[in-house]
Amino acid sequence: MSRQRCLKAVTQGDSESYNQLIGVIHHKEWLAPDEVALLVTSLKALSGAVFYIDSVYHESLLSSIFGMSMWNYGPDVMDALMELIISLAVSSEKYTDFCLGMLVNNFIPPNSFLELLKQPRGIARKEHVISRVHSALKDIADLRPVAPLRLLPIIVGRMPNVFSKEPLIVTYVENMLRLESGAMGEVVGNVMLIAVMDRLIDLDVEIEWEDILQEDSSKGIFEMELEDMEENLNDADKEADELPREFCRRNFLGNVVAEN
């Protein structure tokens, strides 16, 4: 059954083919080559049938599509999925935000993928995903000029918090900066930079004193200040050869106490 007929059948109470379609798209396990081919075919067919998709009758289908992570697939599936997302975004304004949100979700990989980012194939997969995400965002913005403005609150609202794993925060910020320097930079650039700076400030505030004192955790703040003062005293002594050494030391200490 064609995808158009499959989508129409649901509105008439026949959901057998529709449920099979959802099963193909919602499949989360490792895909065999024939399953990959079927998924690609299904996604491409849906791209040509987006005007038959109804948010009421096809809610489960839309949920499955918007929940897909490109990080789990190869290039063929990625391309077919991006084609579908772009088609949906421009087919109806009611889908635009959902499509933008799906793309933003793909800024960062699933937690299960983090270790792979340390390996060459993981880095390559990252570039495959990110390049397609930003290309899709540009295509949507070209076809729907209001999209960049709709994109801003989504990006800012979905930024990883300060307790997220560092690779997730770094990857998300990389995507924000890539947007700022890209075609949409004139529209979103300033907000992107402000949001990045705000998050960096949040991260700085969350730094534990243990991290600051990691070189010698047994030292207190007062001891560190005394060491710094001693270093300053030594520097002052070297620069004051014409004065008695003890006089320099007392004079410098007196200034420090006075300032405090």
Image: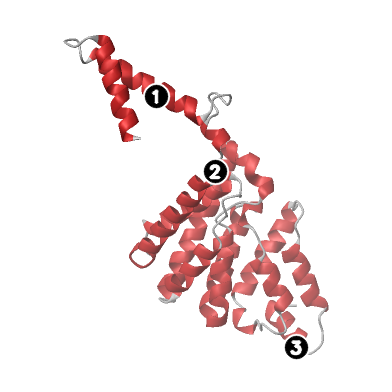
Front-lying residue, 75 or 131: 131
The local crowd at label 1, few if under 14, some if 14 to 19, many if 20 or more residues have their Cα within 10 Å, is few
The local crowd at label 2, few if under 14, some if 14 to 19, many if 20 or more residues have their Cα within 10 Å, is few
Front-lying residue, 7 or 106: 106
The residue singled out by tag 2 in the image is 124
Where does the image place residue 149, in percent across and percent down from the top left? 43, 73
Front-lying residue, 46 or 132: 132
- Quadrant of the image for the C terminus? top left
Q: Is residue 33 left or right of residue 104?
A: right
- Point out which mark residue 228 bears: 1
SS under mark 2: helix
- Of mark 1 and mark 2, the one earlier in the sequence is 2
What residue is at 70 percent from the left and 85 percent from the top?
A: 56
Three-letter residue code for mark 2? Ala
Number of numbered discs on residues:
3
The residue singled out by tag 3 in the image is 11
Three-letter residue code for mark 3? Thr
SS under mark 3: helix
- Of mark 2 and mark 3, the one earlier in the sequence is 3
Where does the image place residue 192, in percent across and percent down from the top left? 41, 60
Mark pair 3, 1: CA separation: 76 Å
SS under mark 1: helix
Vertical placement of 110 versus 49: above or below?
A: above
- Of mark 3 and mark 1, the one earlier in the sequence is 3
**Residue 235 appears in the figure:** no
